[in-house]
Image (cartoon, rainbow, N blue to C red):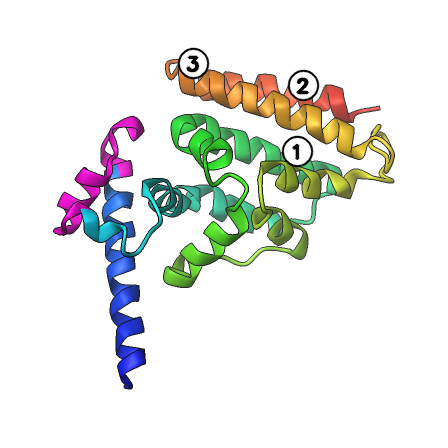
């Protein structure tokens, strides 16, 4: 192993150790209480060490948050292997999304609407490069959505599949406008779940899916 290869290997191991520390804290503590100091203490390093590997705490926490997609990721993989219609896949993905994201709304509100909400593709790829064992296989359609650059792009890639389907009002002309309204509504629901953690995830999901049918069904 060359000197450069050794340096790269050390950097990767230290980066992973910091992400692992952040992942543990996200699981154990209220999300709002996760801090650079606590991550550094858990990893056994000084606070300043983190900034050798990440530009700021937000980037590190966004990367660590990808692990929270695991259950959702498994469900997407199962949907990928199903033989249901495009319409049913669309709503199946949205139902799975809501159940996952509303349950841990503080984490996912930060992930989708926080500082790095427009860098999701890069965040996802960086994370799975370090933890390839967590990356599952999906259909091309779901893969495209899962690695979309932001929540609007992810939702748009889902909705594009409905263009030309019978029984829906989605067309090439209104696609982006309806998607914008859906994203705005989703953000509101996610904020509500974040602000009122005692609300039922199931009821929130059911209500959002009803709204989605209103926007989509002809």
Q: Residue at x 76, y 43 (%)?
A: 161
Q: Quadrant of residue 31?
A: top left
Is 52 on the left-hand or right-hand side of 44?
right
Please tell me how crowded label 3 is: few (under 14), some (14-19), or many (20+) other residues with Cα within 10 Å.
some
Q: Nearer the viewer, mark 1 or mark 2?
A: 2
Q: In the rendered image, which residue does mark 1 sit on?
A: 91
* Residue at the image point whose x is 63% and y is 28% from the top: 183
* Residue 211, label in figure: 2
Quarter in which the N terminus is drawn: bottom left
Residue name at image x 54 percent, y 34 percent: 97
Q: Earlier in the sequence, mark 1 or mark 3?
A: 1
Q: Secondary structure at mark 1?
A: helix
- Percent coordinates x, y for residue 195 in the rendering: 41, 15
Locate residue 44, reporting x and y percent.
Answer: 12, 51
Any part of residue 81 in sight: no
> Where are the magenta residues, as a range?
26-47
Whole-angstrom CA distance, mark 1 to mark 2, is 12 Å
Gap between marks 2 and 3 measured at Cα: 18 Å
Answer whether labels 2 and 3 touch (C-beta < 8 Å): no
Q: Main secondary structure of the magenta part?
A: helix
- The relative height of residue 134 versus residue 173 in the rendered view (above or below) is below
Q: Which label belongs to residue 199?
A: 3
Residue 117 position in % (x across, y down): 51, 38
Residue at image coords 29%, 44%: 23
Which of these two is toward me, 74 or 169? 169
């Amino acid at each position: 192993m060359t000197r450069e290869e050794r340096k790269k290997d050390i950097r990767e191991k230290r980066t992973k150790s910091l992400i692992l520390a952040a992942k543990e804290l996200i699981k154990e503590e209220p999300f709002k209480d996760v801090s650079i100091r606590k991550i550094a203490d858990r990893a056994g390093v000084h606070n300043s060490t983190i900034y050798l590997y990440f530009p700021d705490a937000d980037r590190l926490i966004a990367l660590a948050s990808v692990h929270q997609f695991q259950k959702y990721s498994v469900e997407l993989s199962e949907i990928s292997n199903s033989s249901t219609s495009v319409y049913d896949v669309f709503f199946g993905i949205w139902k799975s999304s809501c159940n996952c994201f509303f349950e841990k709304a503080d984490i996912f509100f930060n992930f989708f609407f926080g500082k790095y909400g427009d860098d999701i593709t890069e965040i996802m790829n960086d994370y799975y490069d370090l933890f390839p064992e967590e990356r599952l296989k999906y259909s091309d359609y779901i893969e495209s959505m899962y690695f979309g650059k932001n929540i609007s792009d992810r939702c748009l890639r889902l909705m594009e599949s409905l263009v030309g389907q019978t029984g829906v009002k989605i067309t090439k002309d209104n696609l982006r406008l309806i998607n914008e309204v859906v994203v705005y509504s989703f953000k509101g629901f996610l904020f509500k779940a974040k602000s009122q953690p005692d609300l039922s995830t199931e009821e929130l999901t059911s209500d959002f899916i009803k709204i989605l049918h209103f926007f989509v069904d002809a």
